[in-house]
Structure formats: structure tokens, C-alpha cells
Image: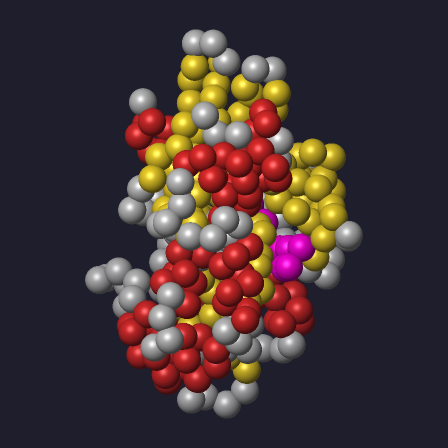
Amino acid sequence: MIEELREALAGGPPLVTGPLEGWEKAAALGVTTSGSTGTPKTVLLSAEALTYSASATHDRLGGPGTWLLALPADHIAGIQVLVRSIVAGTSPGVMDLSGGFRAMGFAQAAQPVLATPGRHYTALVPTQLARIVAGEGPGLAALRAFDAVLIGGAATPPPLLEHARSLGVRVVTTYGMTETAGGCVYDGVPLDGVRVSADDVISIAGPVLALGYQGGEPFGPSFRTEDLGRFVDGRLEVLGRADDVIITGGEKIAPALVERALVAVDGVREACVVGVPDAEWGQVVAAAVVASGVSADELRDAVRVSVGRSATPKRVMFVSELPLRGPGKVDRAAVVTAFR
């Protein structure tokens, strides 16, 4: 794919399925969203947006380098690893994901990348990071050798970030989406040239914006996301999707705040908080938790103290793993179904 992408960025045939009309003809690439919140849409991205994002990323990380692709190349995070490689003039390493993601496979794929001169980068989702740092094997040794490890695609539990950094992994959290040519906020700070506002809902403007959705209207100068956020000490804090907000007994609860309180409890590895329909309350707060050595009452107490009584989960379900979709995002719809 990288040669076709290189040609598209240079003004060659665009990598888009279907005809392009009018303003759409400026597109170099079309990336179809997962459709998790409705009908899948094809996001049209210009070469300028893609390459600006790549260059701004290198500027933030300390300069161009050699990348390891450890994500699917049909999602924007994986595509951007290839674009950054093209912009840097380097050949990326590619991890074979046909058998799933394994720490040992990551170590093997990283070896030739880390042997090249200069700086070295990779991008992962939180689930991949968790699997690597769970042991002290070759995967962790390889991960420590990268100059930066971008983590995005889903919210990263703070304890996981703290643990990874304590092990010497140079983790950089990212926030962005297909409509912004990938991650455009690093460790809570927008990339140079990117403007972010958060009046509850996050809006993004700047040269990383996509052209629009294929078959729809072009985007304006600013893209209003479906995510809630706020700035804390000058850094963007993402509170989850607006349509994930739970309204229980008239109170609005941000699942992300409850999840953070849960994963802060010793023994909890992952948590997903959703709203489950209820005849009396409209919705009740329900938590699916991957944990050991902790009780549901302990979890409720932690949430009550940290977030408040109204956010305390009325239902707690312990699971061996959370269902995933796309490039490592928790499938919240599947979690809701599991509670019914």
C-alpha cells in the first residue's frame, strides 16, 4: 500500500473508492469510519492535511525517524505511520498481525527498525501497550528502545500510563480521529497550527482537517467532534463521547470519570462504564470490570468517594476481557448488550 499512498500524496491517483465530484476531487485518500455510531462514512483527506500532520508530529517528537507499523493499515493511525515514513524518507518496519498482536512478535518486528540509524517511533493502542508491559520479556525491552511510543485510538487508563513510564517506556498519549488526519493533540497539547476549543464538546480547526465526507458537504473551518472535553492546567482532558453520557435520575454522568476511578483501584486492569435502561431511573450506571482480588462493594466505594454518589455503579460485572472493535476500542454496545 505504501507505494500507492506515496503516489497519491504526490498528486497521483487518489486512494478512494467510488467517484469524486466537485470539491471531493482534492482528496488524496478516503478512509471509511467504523460506523459504530451510525452508518459508516468515508472521510476524504487531502495530501496537504496528511503531510502536515506527519511533519507536525515529527516536530513534536524531536525530528523524523524510522517507524514500526504495528496497527492495521486501513485505520487512520496505521495509515499515518506510513505517511510519516514517506515524509521522513524512511522505510517503515511492518509487524505481521495476521495471528493477532503478541509481545514477542512486536519484539521481532522492532529489531530491524531499531537497528537503523536515527530516531525510532511506533504507535499502539492501549490494549497492545498493556500486553507488552505485562511482562519483562523482549517485547518490553524493544518498546523501551523507541524514542516515542504514540498511544491512541481509545482512552488509556492512567495506571497503565504510569506503569509504562515507570518501566522506561516513552509514552505519548494522542487524541484525534480520521476527520483530523489522526492524532492532533499530544499529551493534552495540540500540535503546532492546530486549534482546539472545548465548550463541553471539543472542536478542532487547522490544517489537519479533512475535506469532508464523501457524498456530503465539505467541512467548514472548524470540525465539531462528538467528544466531551475540558482544559485542565492548559491541557485537554477528553471525557468521552457526548452520546456515551449516562442520564440517571436526572443527573448527567461522564463514563470516563467513573472508569478512571475504577482503574485507580488496586487489582483493576480495565473498566468500561455504560448506561443500561432502567424503568425507575431511566438509565443506571453499569460497569464491566477486568480485575482480581477486589469486590463490587470496594469498587462502588471508590467511585462514590472520587466521583460522587450519583455516579456509583448500580450494576457491576466482572469479565475476563472487554470486547473490542476496530483498532482496539472497547465495544460499548456489546457491553450494554451483556448487561441485558
Q: Nearer the viewer, residue 79 or 300?
A: 300
Q: Position of residue 66 (x, y in %)?
A: 49, 79
* Quadrant housing residue 295: top left
The residue furthest right is 233
Q: Position of residue 94 (x, y in %)?
A: 35, 72
Viewport quadrant of the C terminus: top left
The residue furthest top is 279
**Residue at screen point 42% across, 89% down:** 115
Q: Nearer the viewer, residue 224 or 296?
A: 296
* Residue 182 within the magenta-colored segment of the rendering: yes
* Residue 309 within the magenta-colored segment of the rendering: no
Any part of residue 245 in sight: no
Q: Nearer the viewer, residue 266 or 221?
A: 266
Q: Is residue 329 above or below residue 49?
A: above
Q: On the rendered structure, is 106 left or right of 45?
A: left
Q: Position of residue 304 (x, y in %)?
A: 58, 33
Q: On the rendered structure, is 192 left or right of 151?
A: right
The region drawn magenta spans 179-188
Any part of residue 233 in sight: yes
**Residue at screen point 62% across, 72% down:** 61
Describe the colour scheme in one phrase. secondary structure
Viewport quadrant of the N terminus: bottom left
* Quadrant housing residue 99: bottom left
**Residue at screen point 44% across, 57% down:** 125
The residue furthest left is 99
Q: How many marks?
A: 0
Q: Position of residue 214 (x, y in %)?
A: 48, 38
Q: Nearer the viewer, residue 74 or 23?
A: 74
**Residue at screen point 30% across, 63% down:** 101
Q: Is residue 28 above or below residue 162?
A: above
Q: On the rendered structure, is 135 left or right of 198?
A: left
